Amino acid sequence: MARIGFEELDFQITPMGEISLRRRHDPHLGVEVFEVKLNDEYLMSSLFTVAEEELATLGLAAVSGDALDVLVGGLGLGYTAVTALADARVRSLTVVDALGEVVGWHERRLLPVSNTLLDDERTRLVVDDFFDLARRERADDAPRFHAILVDIDHTPTHRLDSTHADFYTAAGLRALARHLHPGGVFALWSDDPPEAEFLALLGEVFPHVAGELVSFDNPITGGVSTNSVYVARL
């Protein structure tokens, strides 16, 4: 549906509220911009993908070896996933999103990276609750992952849903670690700078932890903005 200034590619009512995918042309930058809005909150924009890409780059850089099996929690616009696929060591990529509507956007090839994701035989898109998956006991024959990359909540303390809170505890992180191979890596995107309290919490579970500040040009403000990526390795 076309409206002034943007085109609404999809609008759905989900358990988390109203979600929409919008496309607009930015006349100042001369580019097409894709945006996701949940209720009255802007979740993501294709103008700002550096930190999402760095989530995959930094996370996989911390993993040794080849034939890597990678899990991405949170599909969104797909930039973390396609950056992971650019690493030739990745053998399989499982991307989990709780909203089938978001997975459907890519299956309908509505987004700039959808073709790259769907045309790569290593990719599997799954509709599931990542946090519920992390809580589950891992069966003996269930797969482990060499890297788990997560971009869902805004920060460890600013969450999209209150039910995610238990993930950001020592018990929640230990449950997640059961799904990793020895030496495996957990990496997490955050909208805020690295928090000392969460780094200390990660250190209770993972022997090696770091918080990386990611800077990028902001075409809206004309300045530089920052996000961060936590990297924790068993």
Image (cartoon, grey):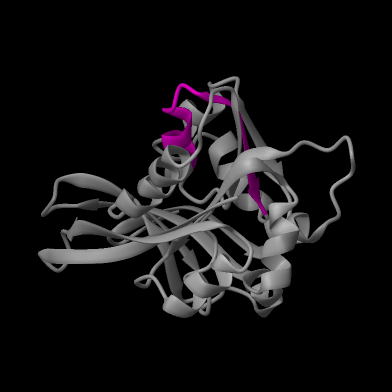
Residue 48, x across and y down, in percent: 30, 55
Q: Residue at x 59, y 35 (%)?
A: 107
Q: Quadrant of residue 162?
A: bottom right
Determine the residue located farthest toward the front in the rendered image: 207
Q: Is residue 4 left or right of residue 188?
A: left
Q: What's the residue at 37%, 45% (across, down)?
A: 53
Residue drawn at point x = 55 percent, y = 43 percent: 105
Estimate the x, y position of residue 149 in percent, counting from the top left: 54, 49
Who's the residue at 47% across and 35% down the image? 84
- How many marks the image carries: the answer is 0
The answer to whether one can see residue 71 in this image is no
User: In the displayed structure, would residue 16 be above or below residue 36?
Assistant: below
Q: Observer-nearest residue: 82 or 228?
A: 228
Residue 104 appears left or right of 114: right
Q: Is residue 74 left or right of residue 88?
A: right
Residue 159 vs 89, above or below: the answer is: below
Where residue 136 appears, as percent x and y from the top left, is 83, 56
Q: Is residue 93 magenta?
A: yes
As for residue 14 lying within the magenta part, the answer is no
Report whether residue 210 is seen. Answer: yes
Q: Is residue 126 above or below residue 50?
A: above
Q: Position of residue 135 (x, y in %)?
A: 78, 61
Question: Does residue 15 sit above or below 114 in this rendering?
Answer: below
Which region of the structure is painted magenta? 81-97
